[in-house]
Amino acid sequence: MIQTPFYLIDRAKLARNMALMDQLRHGSGAKTLLALKCFATWPVFDQMRDHMDGTTSSSLYELKLGAEKFGKETHAYSVAWADHEIAEAVGYADKIIFNSIGQLERFDNQSASINRGLRLNPRFSTSGFDLADPARPFSRLGEWDAGKIEGVMDRISGFMIHYNCENADFDLFDRQLGRIEDEFGPLLKRLKWVSLGGGIHFTGDGYPIDRLAARLRAFSDRFGVQVYLEPGEAAITGAASLEVTVLDTLNNGKDLAIVDASVEAHMLDLLIYRIPARIETSGPHPWMICGKSCLAGDVFGEFDFAKPLQVGDRISIADAAGYTMVKKNWFNGVRMPGIVVKELDGSLTLAREFGYADFIGNLG
Ligand SMILES: *Cc1c(COP(=O)(O)O)cnc(C)c1O
């Protein structure tokens, strides 16, 4: 028995996503690059590598990880590169994507040996949450003035346009891509590749993948470009859980269970976006599942159980792949969940354990 807490990555569930990934790649001709900022747990890259074309990154370290651990095609993007990073970044990257014309010009000489792109901000997005909205007012994420971009077209071969966010609505995607075609068509015609970023929820239940594939192929044909997608969440959705154990129970007006993990430390996105965790359970007994950090609001949510919870009960918290392991932290010194892989034959492999040495080494 592996000691909780641990993140459990299920290769069978990952395989389902990868089959849909192949359906989209083959149907559309688009290449898909894993967005490492969402998921960078490289012990399962062996499985993903056969169904994706490479990785994209948001920093030098992600870029290096992608080049070393995933291989294939490596795109380098960063909101801003530092002078001391650029030579190393160009060394790992097949393509480098600058966030601004200023950065493209600053690093023009150092980057001239590889394909270069620019981030285009279409000034709309599908995110309703301003923290995650690349089209928020005064957004720093990309250039939007076609007149200014015109001046650097001879130095770039592609655009990266990331504007979707867990978009499960194909018709909305279709309409918004149409707006991009209308507004930036003359520029798109002069490029070799266009990355449409991440945030398309094509592995969700019932998503019309074949319509998406046909739409992407039409876009690619119309402008003569290789299309890239940069799925993060869509690649790994539903593929991992956080496995925890109940350490204590009490009743302060509600039945409360304290588990051996923490929302703040191990599923931070739930706090940031103020959404409850997902625990698949039902029954007549409502319980509030609470984290063990001393943050008052360290609460996973309220769920109904078949039986009253007891110390030692095991609970599985779903949706623990995207934006979880990449954000885990040592707040409160809570034991960091290990990383466990459930193999296709059902056996468990402990990929990584964390201990006191990792905690103390993080701080000095
Ligand atoms: C976050 C991000 C992605 C991945 O987004 P998902 O919603 O996880 O698919 C892809 N590209 C860029 C530029 C991003 O910032």
Image: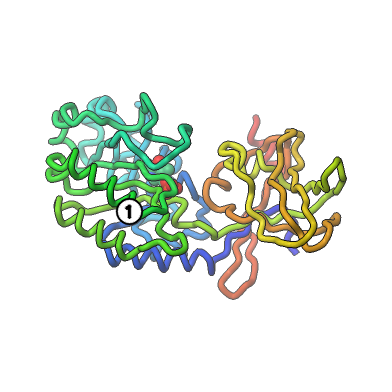
Identified by mark 1, the residue type is: Asp
Q: Which residue is mark 1?
A: 171
Q: Secondary structure at mark 1?
A: helix
Q: Residue at x 22, y 30 (%)?
A: 108
Q: Dot 1 surroundings within 10 Å: few (below 14), some, or many (20 or more)?
A: few
Residue 15 point in image, percent of width and height: 48, 68
Residue 71, compared with residue 335, is above or below; it is: below
| Quarter, ligand 1 | top left
Image-quadrant location for residue 250: top right
Residue 38 point in image, percent of width and height: 48, 47
Of residue 363 and residue 25, the one placed in the foreground of this image is 25
Q: Residue at x 47, y 59 (%)?
A: 45
Of residue 77 and residue 304, the one placed in the foreground of this image is 304
Q: Is residue 35 visible?
A: no
Quadrant of the rendering where the N terminus is positioned: bottom right
Q: Residue at x 15, y 35 (%)?
A: 153
Residue 125, compared with residue 314, is above or below; it is: above
Q: Is residue 6 visible?
A: yes
Colouring used for the render: rainbow
Residue 235 point in image, percent of width and height: 45, 57
Quadrant of the rendering where the C terminus is positioned: top right
Q: Residue at x 30, y 41 (%)?
A: 161
Is residue 348 rendered to the left or right of residue 99?
A: right
Residue 43, compared with residue 146, is above or below; it is: below
